[in-house]
Amino acid sequence: MKKNTTYAADVLVTALAPAIWGSTYFVTTEFLPQGYPFHVAMLRALPAGILLLLLVRKLPQGVWWPRSFVLGALNFSFFWAMLFVSAYRLPGGVAATVGAVQPLIVIGLSRLFLTTPVRPLAIAAGLLGIMGVALLVLAPGAALDSVGVAAGLAGAVSMAFGTVLTRKWRPPVSNLTFTAWQLTAGGILLLPVAYFLEPALPAPTMANILGMAYLGLIGAALTYFLWFRGLARIEPSAAASLGFLSPVVATLLGWLALGQSLTPAQIVGFVSVLFSIWLSQRSQLPR
């Protein structure tokens, strides 16, 4: 009983990360300059990573240098780059639905790298979650773009690899230190991308500064600490299913803060997503 209670607490704490990530769209559109996705991604990761490094005062050693950059690329640089390409070339609902395949990819990679058994209940939960996200965000007649779909799938694969390898590669340091290494590495890798592919940022307004502070301190430093902490304690497939909370929170914020409508299909999507998350966690409990 105590073990199940501890597991439930770890799941709830880990769920805070994707729930907060769901506010990214609202903050980006309402507080940040438009048309600078790679600058925003870099400024979200690098300052937060450096701040955490100053706090923990510990750099990687030996094999953890390349591993930190691999994980930084998978969890941040490449993932965010593909996410933005997908978002620009696809309607938001299509991009979110394509990205929702990530939990199923994590199940396969967990079997390959961690020898975790493939549980039919977890697969069913993943399929139900994809359906729920589609009902939640997919507009009728949404157009498809092959490059956008490929970018969305590449981003999902990148985050899935990052999720599994973060669990497999556990350095002998605290989760806060591990988070600092990955955020800093991801931000460094994004620097040349932002510099060469985008014009210089305009002078920031107070709203821009507040938005970036939120995305960096709360949306990156805090949430990824909680996320990596969770990956050390619960199965990657169970953690990945919590990512379905992001479109749920994004839709709720659009309804509450932006006055967007909420259709019956979206309500069914809400229920489907929440049930799929419960089903995924249920699949991890001892039989």
Image (spheres, helix red, strand yellow):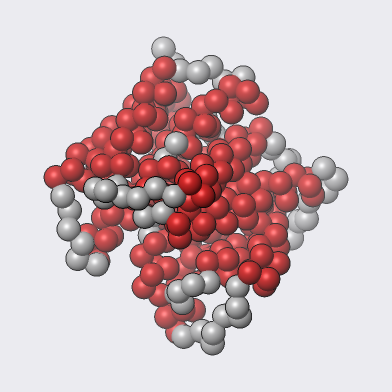
Does residue 54 show up? no
131 sits to left or right of 222: left
Q: Is residue 111 above or below residue 227?
A: above
Residue plotted at (19% across, 39% down): 268
Does residue 146 show up? yes
Q: Is residue 15 above or below residue 234?
A: below
Q: Nearer the viewer, residue 140 or 84?
A: 140
Residue plotted at (42% across, 80% down): 207
Q: Is residue 156 above or below residue 88?
A: above
Q: Position of residue 166 (x, y in %)?
A: 63, 39
Q: Position of residue 63 (x, y in %)?
A: 82, 42
219 sits to left or right of 168: left
Q: Position of residue 56 (x, y in %)?
A: 69, 58
Q: Quadrant of the N terminus?
A: top left
Q: Choose top left, top right, bottom left or bottom right for residue 162.
A: top right
Q: Position of residue 193 (x, y in %)?
A: 66, 65
Q: Nearer the viewer, residue 68 or 265?
A: 265
Q: Quadrant of the C terminus?
A: top left
Residue plotted at (79% across, 47% down): 66
Q: Nearer the viewer, residue 119 or 200?
A: 200
**Residue placed furthest toward the top:** 287
